[in-house]
Amino acid sequence: MKILTFSFFLSFSFGLAAQDKLVGHYRNSFGHHIRLNADNTFNFTWYCDLQSSWTKGIWTFKKDTIYLKMIPIYDTFSYRNSNNLIVDTLILADDEIPKRITPVDEVLFSRPKQKIFPTKRLNSNNMIVDTFIVLEAELPEISLIQNAIVRKELLSGGQNLISCPDKLVLKKGRLYEIQNKRLVTKKQRGPWVRKKFNPWYFRSTD
């Protein structure tokens, strides 16, 4: 029994030591950053031109794999429904402080004409593509909620606009994403340029 107890605590100590070595800042060549904190929380951010995305959550480590679980932060969005009643719903917050958004805050929706906003998106090939969003004043309830989210994204980026990977494999100090049960190792084209870059995350001191 003593031998089993000692083995358990020894394995547990080795696991904690391994996690301590993982703590730090990692980034790749496509504007993605991951910061693994000592309290097992993480920050995932992405920046490209005027757009940005951020995600917070908790991370765990088992064998050679880091598991990332998003913990969403919500704003309370109040709007007037078809029965002329003010009702609440939850939308992803645009910053780390939850708040209430009222129809008064969303003055954009009181304008009578359509508003077309050019924007850019990162597609599945890590290429920035042009697109646009149309906001209207007279909208169904669900469209009003969706447009509130879009407005927040257009103004300053937002939460989890670029999805955080759910797991990363540690190999020789690098963090690799997984696709079709295989490590992503093939070079990929970066945004705005034709040059291809290595896809993995590497430790960064900045």
Image: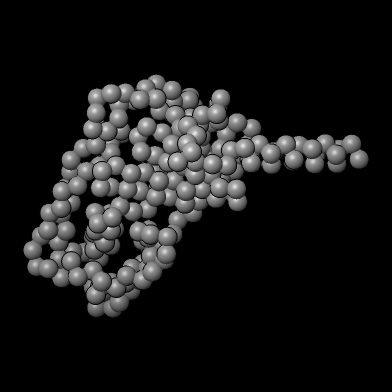
Residue 138 in sight: no
Residue 62 occupies which quadrant of the picture? Answer: top right
Residue at (69% x, 39% y) in the render: 17
Residue at (39% x, 25% y) in the render: 198
Q: Position of residue 115 (x, y in %)?
A: 12, 58
In the image, is 44 to the left or to the right of 122?
right
Image height of 134 relative to 84, above or below: above
Name the image colouring.
one colour
Image height of 46 relative to 90, above or below: above
Q: Position of residue 153 (x, y in %)?
A: 28, 54
In the image, is 141 to the left or to the right of 20?
left
Residue at (18% x, 43% y) in the render: 131
Q: Position of residue 166 (x, y in %)?
A: 48, 40
In the image, is 194 to the left or to the right of 2?
left
Residue 188 in sight: yes
Image height of 90 relative to 24, above or below: below
Hey, which residue is sitting farthest front in the picture? 206
Residue at (50% x, 51% y) in the render: 57
